[in-house]
Amino acid sequence: MREYLVVFGIALGVTYLLASIARQAAYRYGAVARVRDRDVHAIPTPYFGGPAILGGILAAYLVATHLPFLSLADDGVFKDARAVVLGGAVICLVGIVDDLYELDALSKFAGQVLAGVIVVAQGVQFVYLPMYGNYIGLDQVQAMIFTVLLIVGTANAVNFVDGLDGLAAGMVAIGAVAFFAYAFVLAVENGETRAIAAALLTAALAGACIGILPHNFFPARMFIGDSGSMLIGFVLACSSISLTGQFPATELSEGIGGAEASFLPALLPLILPFTILLVPFVDLALAVVRRTRAGRSPFSPDKMHIHHRLLEIGHSHRRAVLLMYTFAGLVAFGSVVISLFSGWQSIAGFGALAVLTIAAVFLLPKLEEKVWS
């Protein structure tokens, strides 16, 4: 655990320091977010959070290769991590080009697929699919398609939700911490080595996301841009995929003490990566339906995302972001607890927190209005 904290700290510190350099580079090369009708920022703001985040993750990876415990890990750990860093560099580069020149949707999609294929070609992929209590093996083509779809979907989901200062980075940081906890506890309870690629990647990802937040939280001095949002979604998706490749299916479907989780134990290993990013995935699905029903491209921008609606009903920018963090933490950590601990207490606690969170969304603006009226 201590070495993972070192990885986390290195990623945080390096990202924080590189963000200042990246911000100046964005101004120099014109990678600046202009103020548009659908935006919530009032002044032009530089991009290039992606290169800073990538630098933090890369630094954490390099340090991990020299730490006493992690450096002795199985070759597969650093092989997977290296593949994710390489694919992450590709998708970050695509995002940088988009931040500079605004790529069309098809070109951006092609770059995302390329990054996914690079990772799959180096062995980071699903090898089985949980279905109706059984596990169906996937051949090479099926595994590649399914893996790339998950990676591209997650990258776009995070990109879609990146509409408020600090929103995407904070939500992914929460998801990364939750998934790190899941991976680490799973390894401990099943007597496996604590040196696993998923834990290494999520520790570095959480550190990088938190490291960028001082620059990106409201009022933001810089945006992470497509280079950052696609990168952090990419790394989170690849972390979950790597975990399924390093643990047998039977171990992933067991809870604490070997007891099966009480909520869809056969399917939970597959849906856990989705639940960590449930809010942006729901936002993505609603956006696609909304735009196609209106006869527009699903990639066309609008101002009807969940975070925009929170602003409309009376929440401040900061509180809207914090509420989205709360939703992300509730779903992410709730999924982890339910997957590891059986019993009605876990489900009841999750339900109670969900009710309180939903109540806060609708009641806080009204209470604030009464106080100030």
Image: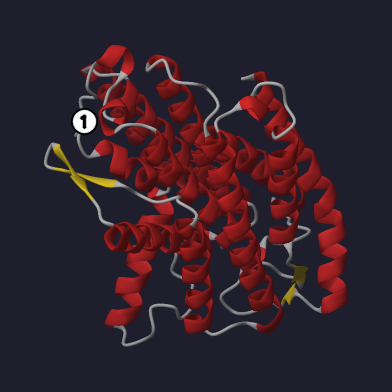
How many numbered dots are placed on residues in this image? 1
Give left or right: position of 373 versus 139: right
Q: Residue 118's spot in the image, x, y percent?
A: 52, 62
Looking at the picture, tell me which residue is in the foreground, 331 or 336. 336
Q: Which residue is mark 1?
A: 263
Instruction: Residue at the far front: name it.
Output: 75
Identify the amino acid type marked 1.
Answer: Phe
Looking at the image, residue 176 lies above or below residue 88: above
* Residue shown at 56% from the left, 75% from the top: 38
* Residue shown at 67% from the left, 19% from the top: 2
Residue 313 visible (yes or no): no
Q: Look at the numbered disc 1 and give the secondary structure of its residue.
A: loop
Looking at the picture, tell me which residue is in the foreground, 288 or 234. 234
Give left or right: position of 66 versus 261: right
Q: Residue 149's spot in the image, x, y percent?
A: 37, 63
Q: Residue 84's spot in the image, x, y percent?
A: 56, 52
Instruction: Residue at the far left: name it.
Output: 132
